Image (tube, rainbow, N blue to C red):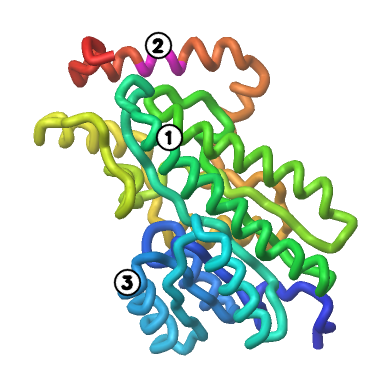
Amino acid sequence: MARKNTIRIFGGATSVVTGAASGIGHGLAEELAKRVSEVVLADRQIELAEEVASKICSSGGNASAFNVDVTDFSAVERLVQETVARTGRLDYIFNNAGIGIGGNVSHFGIEDWNQMMDVNLRGVINGVQAAHKVMLAQGFGHIVNTASLAGLMPSPGNVAYATTKYAVVGLSNSLRAEAAKLGVRVSVLCPGFVRTTILVGGGKYGKMLIDLSPEQHRQMLEMIEKFRPISPNIFAKKALNSVAKNKAIIIVPAWWKLFWWMNRLFPSVGIHLVGKSFQKVQKRFGLAEQN
């Protein structure tokens, strides 16, 4: 039997997942439950989160849902503290909640920047701050932050989103180095194209700042399909396999690593090629004149 001060992978573990009502968070919650982890689902979409938790429980898993806004540190800290008080431990926190706001920088107002930073970056910071001290005290734990390939490569047309995701990658790598000898593991998830609402419209709390006609929207979906988006469930299975191995940067699907490696080796070439591709897309959708 595992000692109390040892992380559990994943059977008998306690896992908190933010943004767990839909998309990647939903997939992670279901897969964690299948691996016999108790799952705490945190989301502003509480009714949907409760439906997911109920589905997990009806399938023999152990899950509960809580209404939490990750931009509110006191709410995140309270969730962590109550979870530890109830279960006696916190093995994992998946700081996954995020939004997308689609548009070029010229389309953004400062309020759009602030919204993106508050959810995608400060939401992760709040989860880290709430869980880190608990994990230090108990001598174990694994912080898993959701970033994106947009946090590893240039992403024109998604500059604000990429800003937050680059920050999450930097936070995760730096904290991993700092906390490794203290018993706390840190990983960062960098999904490629995953079939979620963020991929096509920003998610429940995101938005598109560019008006697309129905035909343009159809063309955009066709373009996205060329990148072979995977389901959140498949993503979760592959991601958790890497979390179990304590990988630092987890890229799923794995074939996207090729683009990451090329960008690392030839960053100037990567910026140039991505920029040219972006301009072609802008021209295709008649958006260049709006810049």
Looking at the rendered structure, the kind of residue marked 2 is Lys
Q: Residue beneath label 2, please?
A: 276
Which quadrant is the C terminus positioned in? Answer: top left
Which of the two discs, 3 and 2, labels the residue nearer the N terminus? 3
Q: Is residue 184 above or below residue 212?
A: below
Closer to viewer: mark 3 or mark 2: 3
Q: Position of residue 236 (x, y in %)?
A: 51, 60
Which mark is first along the chain, 3 or 1?
Answer: 3
Check if residue 275 falls in the magenta segment. yes
Q: Residue at x 61, y 80 (%)?
A: 83
Q: Label 3 neighbourhood size at 10 Å, few (<14), some (14-19), many (20+)?
A: some
Q: Image point 83% across, 48% down: which residue?
A: 178
Q: Which mark is residue 48?
A: 3
Q: CA distance from mark 1 to mark 3?
A: 27 Å
Does the magenta run of residues contain 178? no
- Amino acid on which the number 1 mark rests in the picture: Trp
Q: Which residues are magenta?
A: 274-278
